[in-house]
Amino acid sequence: MLQLQAIREHKDKMISALKKRNIDGSALLENVLVLDEKRRTTQTRLDSVLAESNSISEEIGMLYKSGKAQEANVLKEKTVSLKKESKQLGEDLNHAEEELQTLLYQIPNIPHESVPSGNSEEDNEEVYKEGTIPELKDEALPHWELAKKYDIIDFELGVKIAGAGFPVYKGKGARFQRALIAYFLDKNTEAGYTEIQVPHLVNELSGYGTGQLPDKEGQMYHVTSDDLYLIPTAEVPVTNIFRDVILNESDFPIRYTGYTPCFRREAGSYGAHVRGLNRLHQFDKVEIVRAEHPSTSYKALDGMVEHVKTILRELKLPYRILRLCGGDLGFTAALTYDFEVFSTAQDRWLEISSVSNFETYQANRLKLRYKDKNGKSQLAHTLNGSSLALPRVLAGILENYQTADGIKIPEVLVPYCGFDLID
């Protein structure tokens, strides 16, 4: 959520930056300032009325003590009027604050200056590419055919149990999933991230804290009877660890990693591009989350990018990194790098990780602050990234490592799997 003071001081700059998202923010930000002025005026009047009422109450007490009951009774009539006015002002203030909060929730984060302009994923900027795309024989199969051939993933059984987008992993497929999770967690903990296990459902406050609500409400599974949401990513519960927390500067950086299943409705996703593991309603992901001092958050973002690079290098998968354009940038992010693995059998790139800096946007919603050297409270920066999402990594490995004898297991994963070939 954008900071009111920043909007007051940098409205024109913010309007210009929001154009990168193809948003005309002039009316939105002007409405914010109008509501903010109304809120502040109401607060000032309420404070004045309460102060006057308190002063008169003290005076009434003094008059009674002095035997001036008649004068005291006259003033008591005035306090009745002031109490009525203060009650109405209190209601007006609550209404103005709710209106202001609702409006602020509708405004996305301001893109970082390095974010390119653009309308869609077609305008994202490739900033890095590494790895050699293997040359597969004509009979090479896409991962959903390989999964069926080697009986490691059963998509039809998942449909029977739950519906499309809920695959069942079997035998070496299930073991391979477990191996990937353990490998990703080990890599993250070796890099200094503390492993944690978190709930797979969150309350409404947690959804608002990280920005999934109200922006992505229709994409989340909602348990209405308990008013809980199945998590779309571990980012939500892990980042909410910091909600209503005040840190010291010496606490930075704080780094967490966690594995969770993720649940997404993916409403409106159809076609060949969502086949197999390409897009699921339930999938596994290992996440990394950081709370950082504002002065070091972009250095931390670069470090997260390099960390994901090391994993993909060890897996020996061809990949590229994109800097997302304004039109493709997530609602809460200031800057995002997407990692994509090349799917040889599908002849296209598959997104397998997003690494983002949210600057103070989430922290303002979460009320995540730290005390600076002068003892003043400041908003921290939050960052998160996939490290990694399993379905498309698995798809890339199945397709790029397929041979006439079976699917080779990347060397780094053999100790985790206990086998070196799926046949």
Image (spheres, rainbow, N blue to C red):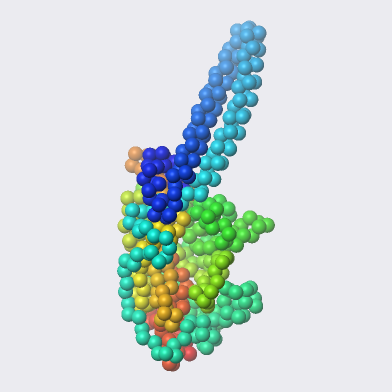
Q: Which image quadrant for residue 225?
A: bottom right
Q: Which image quadrant for residue 311?
A: bottom left
Where is residue 78? Give x, y as percent.
62, 17
Q: Who is closer to the viewer here, 354 or 115?
A: 115
Vertical placement of residue 190 versus 405, above or below: above
Q: Who is closer to the viewer here, 335 or 367?
A: 335
Q: Quick check: can you spot residue 307?
A: no
Q: Which residue extends farthest top?
A: 67
Q: Who is closer to the viewer here, 344 or 416?
A: 344
Vertical placement of residue 310 versus 419, above or below: above
Q: Which residue extends farthest bottom?
A: 405
Vertical placement of residue 193 versus 283, above or below: above
Where is residue 114? Give x, y as percent.
33, 56
Residue drawn at point x = 35 percent, y = 64 percent: 125
Residue drawn at point x = 52 percent, y = 88 percent: 149
Q: Quick check: can you spot residue 318?
A: yes
Vertical placement of residue 53 versus 140, above or below: above
Residue 160 shown left or right of residue 207 in the figure: right
Residue drawn at point x = 43 percent, y = 82 percent: 345
Residue drawn at point x = 49 percent, y = 54 percent: 210
Where is residue 154? Give x, y as percent.
57, 81
* Number of marks drawn: 0
Where is residue 217? Give x, y as percent.
57, 57
